[in-house]
Amino acid sequence: MAELWNLIILNPMLNGLIALSSVFEGSFGLAIIALTVIVRLILLPLTLKQLKSTKSLQGMQPKIQELQKKYGKNQKKLQQEMMKLYKEAGVNPLGCIWPMLVQFPVWIALYQSIMRALATTPESLLDLFRHLYSWEVVAQALPLDSHFLWLNLGSPDSTLILAIIVGGSMWVQQKMVTAPSADPRQKSMNSMMLLMMPFMFGLFTLMFPSGLSLFWAVSNVIGIGIQYWITGWGYLRRGASTELVTKVGGKGGITKRP
Amino acid sequence: MKQVKILFLIAFSLLGLVLASCVPGGTQPAQGWSGITLNDGILYLGSMEGKIMAVNPSARSQNLSFPADGEWEYPITAPSGGGLSCSQTSTSVAIYGTPAVDGDLVFTGGYNGKVYALNTSARSQNLDFPQMRDNEWFYPKTNEVIGAIVGSPVVSEDAIYVTSSNGKVYSLDKHFGDKKWESDVLAKKLWSTPYIEGNKVYISTFDGHLYALSAEDGSITWSFATESGIGFVSSPAVCEGTIFEGSFDDNLYAVKIGESEPLWNFTSGNCFWAAPVVSNSTVYAGCLDGKLYAIDADNGTELWSFDVGSPIVVSPLLVDDLLVVVSDKGMVYLLKTDAVEDNRLLKELSIGVSVQASPCVLDGMVYVRGQDNCLYALDIERGVVIWKFPLTTH
């Protein structure tokens, strides 16, 4: 199984990454950025499908809430009505999950490629040879230069800059898709998730090689771009406006901004 | 609620992705693959726990408790901590190079970027390190470090030569550890073992250069660069004015010292990771493609090859007309260099664990350190493992 994984997914991506490094005159940082862009472009149809499914599901929330109010006590009927609603709207409720699951092997391979290509220890360099093609462009790039901007891509970023970029971009990306909720329980859950993920990845950035963090940062920025293309700033702007208006409404009696 | 579930799914999947660094596929930790040196009947090697050990084969064959006569161990440690860790502790240091022994002194370089000189007498008595009166020292003498040391230290006359991951070569006084000279930065990092011949220090670099440095002051007296910029991966072997060197492009190069063009290159199926061995105009080179090649040193033509079926990571050992070849899968072969193909293999033996450290031979016995952190004594001619000694804490 591992050999099949290496043969079909990991080795092509790893050698492609190293060859890209050669194209960028030995800059492994630029190679990571380029490969992240290429992979995101290849996965764009799946990403779009996922975003559209999410958007459709969010658009149906008022109708779903109506059904929940109406058939809240009869779960069987509720399920039937919801399936009917999905069918009428032509939406697959799992439509936003499958594209995401399909993308995971690619992200894992990209992650493994970056870690292997960096070959920070002698053992890693020796292991790298098991995965290399006999391409001159690959041989020319080795060993990779791990320095990019202020970063040593094989070590964690000792400054907080990359952690802030990774955490911040992840927060923006999540904020754009997280719909504000009237349900207090849901609202607190959303707030927690909105902070937890960026914090967690910010922490990972301080612990893992910065080559990997660079990949996260670039991937987040591209994700924001794609999201903006589909929905604009989404709930990043609307969410902020809603919160603002709700605060004003509390004092002045205005309940919601039209 | 569905959205929360999706976010949880993303969180745990990405967490899994991050944790993938802990399983094969991520960066492998530095564990070391120190080879074995023989001096005065004692084997010196580094363990995977970062200890320099002196092992008496005679005591091991009698299964005496460790340490027996002439035996000792000394842990090389470095302070660790910082980052997200609150406390500072000591961790063991990976040792890659084969220790160099000169009289009572054992020299080694650590992956922590320090060079050590240990006195066998002081270590046998387990005295505090360093015992200055016994010529023990470490370099740099302050808390500073030079870059991680991967290549083996080499002793020549009064000096010890080491390469460092900071791209420099250092010459140190072997008695006191004072720096005689340090070279210019020759590459972004140097992991190869220097080769000393006459008053020259020969170095190969990952960025495709060969250098001859003056052993007196470290100045560059000759350099060679590959046209394509393809780097050299193995340590150099020098014989009769020619350097033999494996590169990243699956070639073994022969370069006449003083020339700017290679004499020849020999292409294989993968890299020549280990330094070749040269004798009687024949180059014996183990390759990661799983073959041991015998190549004509004059013109680079293949004389014969022997397929061991798994990568060869360590240099072969040449004893008279016999060649000991160890494969990454732990197979040990005894080959007769001057035999015809059908009679070339004399014996083979498996220890069943990966071998990435240089073995050594004494009195017909082959000593091999496996990646299971054990030392093996093999009677290769009889095809049996005589003893196995765990290098774990005693």
Image (tube, rainbow, N blue to C red):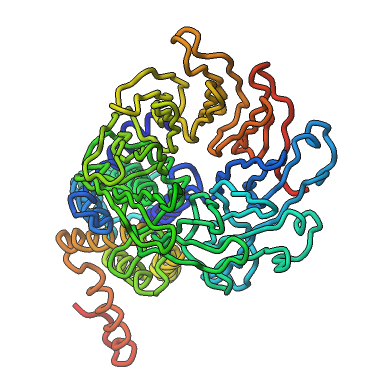
Is any atom of residue A227 visible in this view?
A: yes
Residue B187 image-quadrant placement = bottom left
Q: Work out which residue is located at the far left of the displayed protein and give it.
A: A229
Q: Residue at x 20, y 44 (%)?
A: A90
Of A114 and A24, nearer the camera is A24
Of B160 and B85, nearer the camera is B160
Q: Work out which residue is located at the far top of the displayed protein and give it.
A: B342
Q: Residue at x 34, y 32 (%)?
A: B270
Q: Work out which residue is located at the far bottom of the displayed protein and give it.
A: A252
Residue B305: image x %, image y %? 40, 19
Left or right of B143? Residue A61 is left
Residue B20: image x %, image y %? 46, 48
Q: Is residue A46 above or below residue B148?
A: above
Left or right of A44? Residue B350 is right
Of A154 and B53, nearer the camera is B53
Q: Is residue B376 above or below residue B77?
A: above
Residue B275 image-quadrant placement = top left
Residue A218 image-quadrant placement = bottom left
Is any atom of residue A94 visible in this view?
A: no
Q: Work out which residue is located at the far front of the displayed protein and give it.
A: B198
Left or right of A128? Residue B394 is right
Q: Is residue B318 above or below residue B241?
A: above
Residue A8: image x %, image y %? 31, 32
> Quadrant where the N terminus of chain A lies?
top left
Q: Residue at x 37, y 56 (%)?
A: B213
> Quadrant where the C terminus of chain A lies?
bottom left
Q: Residue at x 68, y 41 (%)?
A: B43
